[in-house]
Amino acid sequence: MTAPLSGKTIAVLATDGFEQVELDKPVAALKTAGAEVHIVAPEAGEIQGFNHHDKGDRVAVDRVLADVSASDYDGLVLPGGVINPDTLRLEEAAIGFIRGFTEASKPVAAICHGPWPLIDAGAVKGRKVTSWPSLKADLTNAGARWVDEEVVVDNGLVTSRNPDDLPAFCKKMIEEFTEGRHVE
């Protein structure tokens, strides 16, 4: 039997300060499902993971943000951690990269604080989402309908609250990436 994501390439956009498990578990699930996965970051080299407040592992960057576009990928993963998405929100290239996925109706999966840059990309207005609770006001103010649920899927946008939700998040992420573009 063919792996559901065989032939698909998925970008994981992250920088220093990502939550380790929120990058590691989705990447493992994507690879198990047959996807080619690229860690995309603003700079080459390695990015620093965190286990909550403590430093975790360093992860090699596969592609530099300036050298890729959403058209190179079938889907996008945005891991959380507080520092990671907050830093990405200030990167014009990161916001443009994210916007490229949403404008092309390609699936995006964001967990915990990962939905934060979706606000700057204009990707949450009118969408049902969830996140880490501290993002509720930001997402609501950006026009999203925030709910406190394990995993939320809205037309190719997959969101979850925290690392405890990773099993449900990864399952729905694989489903949405398998379906591909979600044109209304």
Image (cartoon, grey):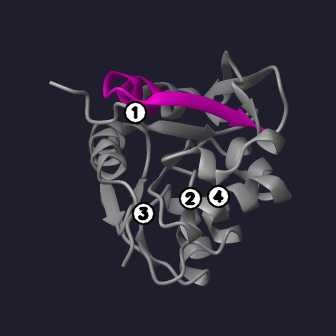
- Callout 3 crowding tier (Cα within 10 Å): few <14, some 14–19, many ≥20: many
Image marks 3 and 2: residues in contact by CB distance under 8 Å: no
Residue closer to the observer: 51 or 1: 1
Is residue 28 magenta-colored? yes
- Callout 2 crowding tier (Cα within 10 Å): few <14, some 14–19, many ≥20: many
Is residue 44 magenta-colored? no
Q: Is residue 25 above or below residue 92?
A: above
Can you tell which mark lies on residue 41? none
Residue range corresponding to the magenta coloring: 26-41
Q: Residue 48 appears in which quarter of the rendering?
A: top right
- The reply to whether residue 52 is visible in this rendering is no
In this figure, which residue is indicated by the disc labeled 3? 130
In this figure, which residue is indicated by the disc labeled 2? 115
Kindly identify the amino acid type of the residue bearing the numbered disc 3.
Answer: Thr
Question: Could you give the CA–CA distance between mark 4 and mark 3, rounded to whole angstroms?
Answer: 18 Å
| Badge 3 or badge 1: first in the primary sequence | 1
Q: Residue 100 appears in which quarter of the rendering?
A: bottom right
Q: Is residue 136 above or below residue 134?
A: below
- Quarter of the picture containing the C terminus is bottom left
Left/right of residue 95 with respect to residue 18 in the rendered view = right
- Callout 1 crowding tier (Cα within 10 Å): few <14, some 14–19, many ≥20: few
Question: Could you give the CA–CA distance between mark 1 and mark 4, rounded to whole angstroms?
Answer: 21 Å
| Badge 4 or badge 3: first in the primary sequence | 4
Q: Residue at x 71, y 69 (%)?
A: 120
Instruction: Find numbered disc 2 in the image and state the secondary structure of the residue it sits on.
Output: loop
Instruction: Find numbered disc 4 in the image and state the secondary structure of the residue it sits on.
Output: helix
Kindly identify the amino acid type of the residue bearing the numbered disc 4.
Answer: Ile
The picture places residue 102, in percent across and down from the top left corner, at: 55, 66
Q: Nearer the viewer, mark 4 or mark 3?
A: 4
